[in-house]
Amino acid sequence: MRTVQKEKGARGSWFLPERFLQGLKTAALGRNLVFRERAGSTNDLARELAERGAPEGTLVLAEVQTRGRGRLGRRWRSPRGGLWFSLVLRPGVAPAPLSGMSLVVACAVARALREETGAPVQVRWPNDLVLQDRKLGGILVEVGTGWAVVGIGINVNVPLAKLPREVRDTATSLLESLGHPVDPEALLQRVLVELEGSYETYQKGEPLHQEWRAFSSLLGRRVKIVLPEETFEGEAMDIDPDGALVVRTERELRRVLAGEVKVIRDVGGEHHGGPRD
Ligand code: BT5
């Protein structure tokens, strides 16, 4: 069943729910749709809906978020021009480590962006979408009893000037990188199709780590890992089937399941932006 919920008086938006649904080629993702021109955080809305029994695939989309969230309570800037949305999922299996789930989503989104725009989007473990090491988007996975909410933010037609300086220095958008605007509706449709495919594979327990490796912006590079209690450096060697980043330090191989990664430039020789394999 297709359901569209749109707030009263919504107008002047690029997003037309009926047209979007007509062109959507998924079985479940996005079929139940909540659209807001302005929301606090689509993840908050989706969590409430999930708690109240919203079906799997429910999509919450906002044109602008006033309280967009990143991980660990960080802010996610969400001006007009971006794609800011969340999906309610109901994984049949106990949710695997969040890094695994983030990677499934991040790679599916990267694949969709590459196919729609040709931009060589990569995934910076565990949840960033990057273009030439600049942050193009991010994934925020949150889980509760019987549900997972996957939040996806993509700087599509966002001029960098619309982002605060501290973000501008490390961010990019498709508009900035390609030099022209991209159709956000077609992009969203494609993201949902790619995501549905990857989610099915993930649900069946089939391996996806070959793709995680291929899309990674980190492998073969010197990185600094920041954990709550310690920080260490090493070479990013691999992403294993659980979604852990394998880092070779001077003494040992370490598996990192969650944490922050910084690429260290100009250390250990050249810097290369492309995937290794
Ligand atoms: C993320 O967190 O990258 C996850 C972002 C998820 C956003 C989506 S939008 C739809 C849904 N609803 C929400 O409320 N959230 C999700 P993290 O790895 O913690 O990165 C956060 C950091 O990215 C911030 O501290 C800034 O440095 C930077 N940042 C903030 N806004 C940005 C933007 N628009 N583009 C690039 N970088 C940004």
Image (tube, rainbow, N blue to C red):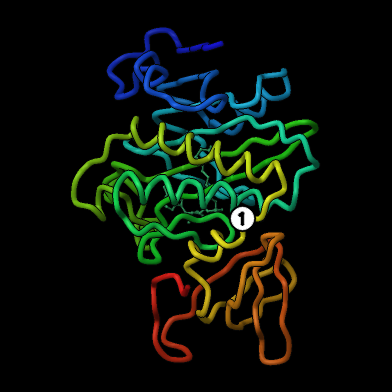
Q: Position of residue 201 (x, y in %)?
A: 63, 44
Q: Position of residue 137 (x, y in %)?
A: 44, 50
Q: Position of residue 85 (x, y in %)?
A: 49, 33
Mark 1, Cα crowd under 10 Å, few <14 / some 14-19 / many 20+, is some
* SS assignment at label 1: loop
For the N terminus, the image quarter is top right
Q: Position of residue 257 (x, y in %)?
A: 71, 63
Against 258, is 101 above or below?
Answer: above
In the displayed orientation, state which residue is furthest to the top: 8
Res 13 → quadrant: top left
Q: Is residue 249 left or right of residue 198?
A: right
Type of the residue with mark 1? Leu
**Residue at image mark 1:** 208
Residue beneath the point at 65% across and 64% down: 259
Res 141 → quadrant: top right
**Residue closest to the eye, 38 or 20:** 20
The answer to whether the beta carbon of the residue marked 1 is less than 8 Å from any atom of ligand 1 is no
**Residue closest to the eye, 220 or 67:** 220
Q: How many marks?
A: 1
Against 190, is 39 above or below?
Answer: above
Res 199 → quadrant: top right
Residue beneath the point at 39% across and 57% down: 121
